[in-house]
Amino acid sequence: MIKRIGIFLGITFIVSILIIAQTTLSNFIWLIQADMPVTLVMIVTKLFEDVLRMMVIVFPIIFIVNLIFFLVAMIVSRYTALNKKRAYALSGGLGLFLISVGIPFLAGGIYGLTGARSVIGKIIFTLIGLLGGFLFGKHLDKSKLETS
């Protein structure tokens, strides 16, 4: 059980970093398109700053969403023939898709995570969620093999 919690926290941390990086990089792409002077040093510095500053907000959101959706995936995969890796991948992708669509809907059009403003941003959020869920399911399978 402790190992599963560690895997969950690790995957949530990785997904949070990827979401923050995607948000920061999409902002820099916008600045570059607006002919603003952007350097590689600025990008790297801002990436580290954003990870440190935004993690306080992003991690709890991803934690709660993943917890809810992964619990549903656990129940669904237990009572159906759906592979655990697929179930967790689908739940992670759906969770982050709902974050990318739901936050602006609930906040009256305000994007808390600006990386999800565009359709491409929403797709990337969903893919990050799919990856996180897949990795969680994959590591659960590995930990089950190690304990048996």
Image: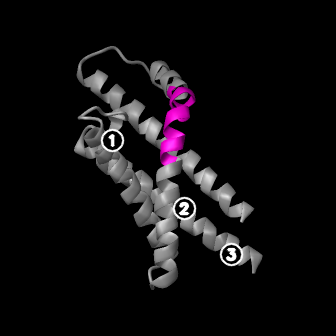
Query: Which residue is rendered at x = 76% and y = 75% of the image?
Result: 147
- Does the magenta stretch mainly form a helix, a strand or a loop? helix
Q: Amino acid at mark 2?
A: Leu
In which quarter of the view is residue 121 placed? top left
Residue holding disc 3: 144
Residue holding disc 2: 135
Q: Amino acid at mark 1?
A: Ile
Query: Which residue is rendered at x = 45% and y = 84% of the image?
Result: 80
In which quarter of the view is residue 1 placed? bottom right
Q: Amino acid at mark 3?
A: Lys
In this picture, is 64 found above or below 29? below
10 Å crowding of disc 2: few (<14), some (14-19), many (20+): some
State which region is magenta. 50-62
How far is the residue under mark 2 from the one under mark 1?
25 Å
Task: Look at discs 3 and 1 and give the one toward the viewer.
Answer: 1
Measured as percent of width and height from the top left, residue 73 is found at 47, 69
Residue holding disc 1: 103
Measured as percent of width and height from the top left, residue 6 is found at 68, 55
Task: Look at discs 3 and 2 and give the one toward the viewer.
Answer: 3
